[in-house]
Amino acid sequence: MRVLVAMSGGVDSSVAAAVLRDAGHQVIGVTLHLWDAPEEERVGRCCSPEDQADARRVCDHLGVPHYVIDETSAFRAHVVDDLVRAYGDGITPAPCVRCNQGVKLPALVALANAFGAERIATGHYARVVRRGDGAVELHRARDGKKDQSYFLFGLDRATLERLELPLSDVTKDESRAIARRAGLPNADKGDSQELCFVPDGDVGAFVERQGGGGRAGVMRDADGRRLGTHAGVHHFTIGQRRGLGLGGGASRYVLRIVPDTGEVVVGSDDALLGSTLVARDARWCGDDPPREPFEADVRIRYRHAAARATVTPAADGCTFDARFLEPQRAITPGQAAVVYDGTRVVGGGVIVGAAGAA
């Protein structure tokens, strides 16, 4: 097959290209240029000239063509501008979910059509299962620590049918070992840990550099007592402990953000527990949206261990509730709630509210 491979310049996407080439497929490497950062800012995977150069070097080593495609406008509209608005509203978005849904995968599908490629491939750790009856499913990867199915829950069936994920049964250590055996020039390149467009991990400062920001205001405890002031709600997220500027004493965590008044409410870790979430903009994988309540495992952020819940979809399929058997910590508006049946991704949506928390 002719396969279009998304090449970030990192080890995993490079290994995906190598595995597909060695399997006899005609590989075309594509790097999506997503973000132009000021020269003095160090940026991570997908966004720096060095990463694009690494992707080209890998393609040269593999003897496959490589193209760089400008997707900066789409990335700003779907990811950066959305993040700036969300933080100003006291919401913590999931940029990687937005990027995959609105930028990367749609761009890859369009490019595959232009190049006459039957399939598209990425270096994500997740698994596409093609059943005998023609159905296609998204599942967790073998490597539970690296599983990235959480970021891909919103892909439609047509995209899943064309998607190849060569790292589905590979651990991170095995991926790096493959890179070394193949002699890939970036085999020992470190992993990116931050958002690719936020160089130092300081999202609040990034929001301000982009001309955004939330209302400044007062910090209070759960009983309404004034504890201090802050410079803007965009500096906070539910569950945050560091950087509150409240001095010593018992640890406090952000429990609630009120963007209209600028209030940030803090309290004990126990007060972060919530039993129910509401999610909207739901997307369901493969089959028609579910109509009746069902039991499932639900993840409320990428590093969250999925917890058992009763999921109740709305009649229109666009909204659902999830009531957990045991309360969960820091259910955060803006994050994705992804629903699993065992290893299979059923669907997901964007958290807009929680109940049972302080």
Image: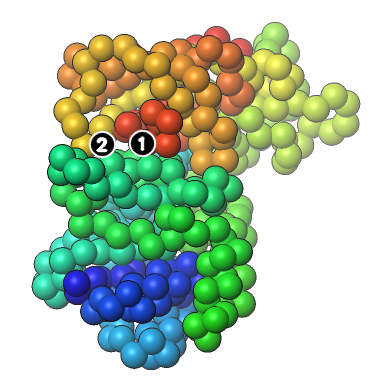
Kind of residue at disc 1:
Val
Q: Secondary structure at mark 1?
A: strand
> What residue is shown at x 55% (from left), y 45% (from top)?
144
Q: Secondary structure at mark 2?
A: loop
The circle on residue 345 is: 1
In which quadrant of the rendered view does residue 266 lie? top right
For the question of whether residue 289 can be seen, the reply is: yes
Q: Where is residue 350? Give x, y as percent.
A: 37, 31
- Which numbered disc flags the more N-terminal residue, 2 or 1? 2
Q: Where is residue 155? Give x, y as percent.
A: 26, 45
> What residue is shown at x 23% (from left), y 43% (from top)?
131
Q: Is residue 273 above or below residue 49?
A: above
Q: Is residue 276 above or below residue 148?
A: above
Q: Which residue position is annotated with label 2? A: 285
Q: Is residue 327 above or below residue 50?
A: above
Kind of residue at disc 2:
Cys
Q: Residues within 10 Å of mark 2 (few under 14, many from 20)?
A: many
Q: Which quadrant: the C terminus?
A: top right
